[in-house]
Amino acid sequence: VRSATIDDTHTFVRHQQIEEEYQRILDLIKKIMSDFGFKKYKMRVSTRDVKHKGKYLGEETLWRKAEVAIQKVAQKSDIDWYLGPGEAAFYGPKLDIMIEDAIGREWQCSTAQLDFVQPVNFDMKYIDEKGKEQKPAVLHIAILGSIERFMGVLIEHYAGKFPLWLSPVQVKVIPIADRHREYAENVAKILSADNIRTEVDSRNESMQGKIRDAALQKVPYMGIIGDKEVTRSVIPSVYPERSRREVEGSRSQQKLFISIRTREGKDLGQINLKEFISKLLQEIEKKY
């Protein structure tokens, strides 16, 4: 490994705030795991190896209180948890979220690590309510952990078949022939204007080949454009005085039609582009 990217934050807390702060962190972790669709994960309370206490820095009393506080948070949660003796960092106990991958292996992702050492090293102090100097503890928090590792677990979790909101490409617009390309690009611009991640497959390939490739790439929706869609979308020429820009403007608002297929192979038929965009935005908002 040459480098790793971590969403690392550092919070300074009083010792009596440790349990409360861990509860807040766990609530945030649960929300993030839910947002990403993870349901199979466990919590590990990483404590000292009691047979080798000399490996750890910090006062014995602080260690004991902190380990008890973290276990209380774990006991009150609805997440399966277990003790990890010897898994603590040398500077303090921690709470780790272990996500199970596609073949049953556990990977540590989220972590909240308590640190009694750095406040001493950096001579950190605060004045308590009695006017006395006290040393805080530091919480090193990473909700996703290593971004690269989290992405690997996420890809395996969905086998690449991401829900719509997570898909790198949400809609692949497929013109059947070269004469449909301009229309396809116009559709793509309208989709992109609503922040829908869209690509146009304008390769000189068959329609079935393009559909197959999009399905293999696990793109959630394919918008097929051919003569039927273009013909239905064209405004009748009974208004010859209208400029091209006016016609295109009318199309962009409500007159465009596309045929939709899903990556599972379901044919949704022709649909008004405005209605399709509304459907996509609702699905993205719901997430699952």
Image (cartoon, rainbow, N blue to C red):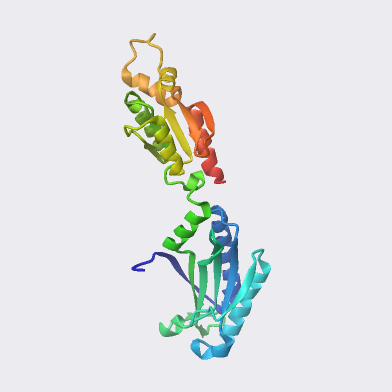
Instruction: Tell me which residue sits at (50%, 47%) in the image.
Output: 161
**Looking at the picture, how far across and down is residue 61, in whole percent?**
59, 87
| Residue 202 falls in image quadrant | top left
Residue at the top extreme, as displayed: 238
Q: Is residue 148 above or below residue 252?
A: below
**Looking at the picture, how far across and down is residue 21, in whole percent?**
57, 70
**Looking at the picture, how far across and down is residue 203, in whole percent?**
32, 34
Q: Quadrant of the N terminus?
A: bottom left
Question: Does residue 75 appear left or right of residue 267 in this picture?
Answer: right
Q: Nearer the viewer, residue 47 or 122?
A: 47
Question: Does residue 119 appear left or right of residue 205 in this picture?
Answer: right
Instruction: Tell me which residue sits at (49%, 56%) in the image.
Output: 156
Q: Nearer the viewer, residue 270 or 113?
A: 270
Residue at the bottom extreme, as displayed: 54
Answer whether residue 194 is visible to the viewer in this image: no
Instruction: Tell me which residue sits at (47%, 61%) in the image.
Output: 150
Answer whether residue 166 is visible to the viewer in this image: yes
Instruction: Tell me which residue sits at (57%, 55%) in the image.
Output: 34
Q: Is residue 164 above or below residue 62?
A: above
Q: Is residue 181 above or below residue 50?
A: above
**Looking at the picture, how far across and down is residue 136, in whole percent?**
50, 79
Total labels drawn: 0
